[in-house]
Image (cartoon, grey):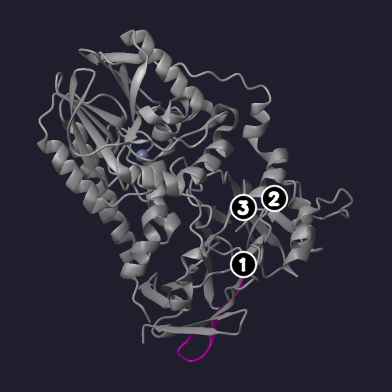
Amino acid sequence: MMAKLMTAALLVTASAPALAAPADPLHSPMWEHHAARLFGKDAVVFDQRVAVRIPEIAENQRIFPVTVDARALPHVRRIVLFADLNPIPVAVDYAPTGAEPFLATRIKLDQRTPVRAAVQTEDGTWHVGGSWIDAAGGGCSAPPVSRVKGDWADHLGEVRAGQWPEKAGETRLRMTFRHPMDTGLVENIPAYNIERLTLRDDSGRSLGEMQIFGSVAEDPAFTLVVKATGAISFEARDTAGLRFPGKVGA
Amino acid sequence: MKLQRRALLLAGLLAPAAAIAEQFAGKYNPLAEQVADGLWMVRGADEAIGFANGGAIANSAIIATDAGAVLFDPGVSREHGRALGALAQKLTGKAVGRVYISHLHPDHAMGAAAFDPAIVHALPATRADLERDGEGFSDAMYRLLADWMKGTAVVLPQGDVTEGQAEFGGRQFRLMALKGHSGGDLALLDEATGTLLAGDLVFHDRAPSTPHASLPDWRASLDRLAAMPHKLLVPGHGPLDRDGSAIAQTRDWLGWVEQTLHDAVAHGLDMSEAGELPIPPRFSTLKAARYELQRSVSHFYPRLEAELLPKL
Ligand SMILES: [Zn+2]
């Protein structure tokens, strides 16, 4: 299935159907393809209120930090983080049901690509922000550390987390999970990744749900801001059905 | 991810380096400044490695001896090494007879491709580092620098350097086997002139880079360099240090980065936020400060999180 996704992503379609999506200020060769697939017939605008904060350079293409902050937008329903030219373009699809439209994580980069967030508001409109990153890497960057090191299974699912007060009634959560996040694009290693993260307050109310894809970096880390205080529990689940639960502020 | 090769296919259509390469006419023109009797410093650009500078960002030094010129750090590529060799010949009247590589990083090491491996000397730790990382660096440099790298293969130094006294062509050197910027950092004191070639253990008015850094080791090495009497210091990057301030400046930056990133993790910042933290005014003379801070975030953050975030 990943192979199909990849093939589709590589075929820059000259015959893409006419779109409602506006012309891409980043002039990405993949914009129309992704816009059609992600947004369908929904309205799309490029919007500075969607802040996608990334470093000047991709020092480590396997752990590239991205922060999406759409707190300037009202009534956010969904945040999709994607890199146009990645073989697995979408990294995260987040519904911040009881959370601020804020998300920080790390993704893998395959090459020079736009990194974007598409943020859907209640009226159905997608607000898009982002910029290019050159993934050629810094001069002193080390070659990829591979999972060949072989100790990943010993630490699988190790969960770390912390919480900090954000503004009144809100909590900043940081969570890390030890997980190989195999993309399925490496020979002889099938896709194996964390695919879902859910957050709940002490009463069991959902604070957010996230779909997670193989382009999120190994040992994934997430920073979120939930509209709740006190005990907050979360649970990640991987494609093998393993569950990695945690609780902070208990 | 084994994406590199496929990426290269697409990159042919998209990467700016490939487009520039079509009319490639780049030529290295290293310039030497005599800083002491029979000793020249060749300044690198105080920038990140990039196509525009051909990767010529590290400082090198040339020392005249009876047995040929000594070249300390041969540059980033074969052509760069050749240009430095030609410069040494012009300055000293003799061909390069000895090359020292201070440490594994490509801006310092890969120009060894211009020389007979038998005359290339380095610490055993540096050879081991190059055995491990050389090919990876080579890939990265070809991607970044394209035609500037032509003909550049990884050369493993054949000469082992050890701590202590060394003589070459009648000139006395004190060699120091250090580490901390990388797994093996060679420093060389030219005894006749009191000039200390510090490699990347010392940066001067250019922010230090930390991809293979061990900060406790680096600090211990700075202590040893500071304790070694010298008149002049040639840093790995940045201008000549005449007043002994560069060692302290390097130590100050490393301490600030370490404390700042520790606090950032402790206060719940993510990596992008940490990379955007304000840089104190006392570092305003350091070139590439924001760039190196963001690189250091990438180098240190995951480890700090594993240390500071509570395990559930
Ligand atoms: Zn270095």
Q: Position of residue B96 (x, y in %)?
A: 36, 18
Q: Amino acid at mark 3?
A: Asp
Q: Position of residue A220 (x, y in %)?
A: 50, 68
Residues at marks 1 and 2 touching, judged by CB atoms closer than 8 Å: no
Q: CA distance from mark 1 to mark 3?
A: 12 Å
Task: Pick whichever of labels 1 and 3 is earlier in the sequence.
Answer: 3
Residues at marks 2 and 3 touching, judged by CB atoms closer than 8 Å: yes
Any magenta on residue A211? Answer: yes
Of all chains, the one bearing label 2 is B
**Quarter that holds the N terminus of chain A:** bottom right
Q: Is residue B144 left or right of residue A24?
A: left
Q: Which residue is mark 3?
A: A110
- What residue appears at the point 51 percent right and 44 percent down from the top-left corner? B135
For numbered disc 3, what is the local secondary structure?
Answer: loop
Query: Can residue B205 be seen from the camera position used here?
Result: yes
Give the class, few, some or many, for how many residues have Cα within 10 Å of label 1's Cα (few <14, many ≥20). Answer: many
Q: CA distance from mark 2 to mark 3?
A: 9 Å
Q: Amino acid at mark 1?
A: Gly
- What residue appears at the point 46 percent right and 65 percent down from the top-left corner? A149
Comparing B210 with A90, the one in front is: B210
- What secondary structure prevails in the magenta region? strand
Q: Position of residue B286 (x, y in %)?
A: 31, 34
Q: Which residue is mark 1?
A: A214
Comparing A51 with B148, the one in front is: B148
- What residue appears at the point 87 percent right and 48 percent down from the top-left corner? A14
Instruction: Evaluate whether label 2 is on the same chain as label 3.
Output: no
Q: Which residue is mark 2?
A: B6
Q: Is residue A29 left or right of residue A56?
A: right
Query: Can residue A26 be seen from the camera position used here?
Result: no
Q: Is residue B51 left or right of residue B127?
A: right
The answer to whether residue A29 is above or below residue A200 is above
Query: What range of the chain is rendered magenta?
Result: A200-213
